[in-house]
Amino acid sequence: MELIETTKRELIQAKDRMLSLLASTPDDKLNWKPSPTSRSILEVVAHTAHALKNIRIQMSGTPFPISTSAQAQAEFHHHDKAFDTREKAEHYLVEAVEEYIAFLDTLTESDLERLEEMPFGLGPAPLSAFIPAGYMHTMGHNAQIEYIQTIYGDEDWHFGF
């Protein structure tokens, strides 16, 4: 199933990029925020992992329990603060990606057409449309980390060249 294999590759690449960005962040910048309402890099990594876990649970047929994005944002901000070290955030991300991939490995071709409820009242969608959400969300947060790094003065692309 090409969609599943592509999604797994993309998610691993996005995770590896995030871990590389996390590794390139100096200790004194891990909890730095450009504004009080922003996320720090550690919080972005923790949020990404938490979202992957939530997406996986939703794809398994359990509806997202939070009804509004504003409520979700508040709860996520509170949750993400617990990941206050590089090691905690890194472990959480690796664990979330492993669980997501393990879930994808259980799917059959017929599962891809199964309708699952999207969060925030967006209605049902076939699982095939939901599967890429994890890596797409992760890639978006990679860009967020890159932007935070430029705000604190790091203009290295961290690609090794």
Image: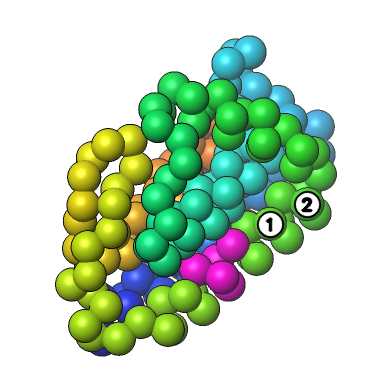
In the rendered image, residue 19, in percent from the top left (x then y), is placed at: 62, 57
Category of crowding for the residue at label 2, using alpha-carbon neighbours closer than 10 angstroms: few (below 14), some (14–19), many (at least 20): some
Which residue sits furthest top?
36
- Mark 1–mark 2 contact, CB under 8 Å? yes
Name the colour scheme.
rainbow
Amino acid tagged 1 = Tyr
Amino acid tagged 2 = Lys
Residue at numbered disc 1: 92
Q: Residue at x 75, y 42 (%)?
A: 83
In the rendered image, residue 7, in percent from the top left (x then y), is placed at: 35, 71
Q: Is residue 83 visible?
A: yes
Q: Is residue 47 above or below residue 115?
A: above
Element class at badge 2: helix
Element class at badge 1: helix
71 with respect to 68 (left or right)? right
The segment highlighted magenta reads 96-100
Number of residue marks: 2
Per the model, the C-alpha gap separating discs 1 and 2 is: 6 Å
Q: Is residue 19 above or below residue 27?
A: below
Category of crowding for the residue at label 1, using alpha-carbon neighbours closer than 10 angstroms: few (below 14), some (14–19), many (at least 20): some
Residue at numbered disc 2: 88
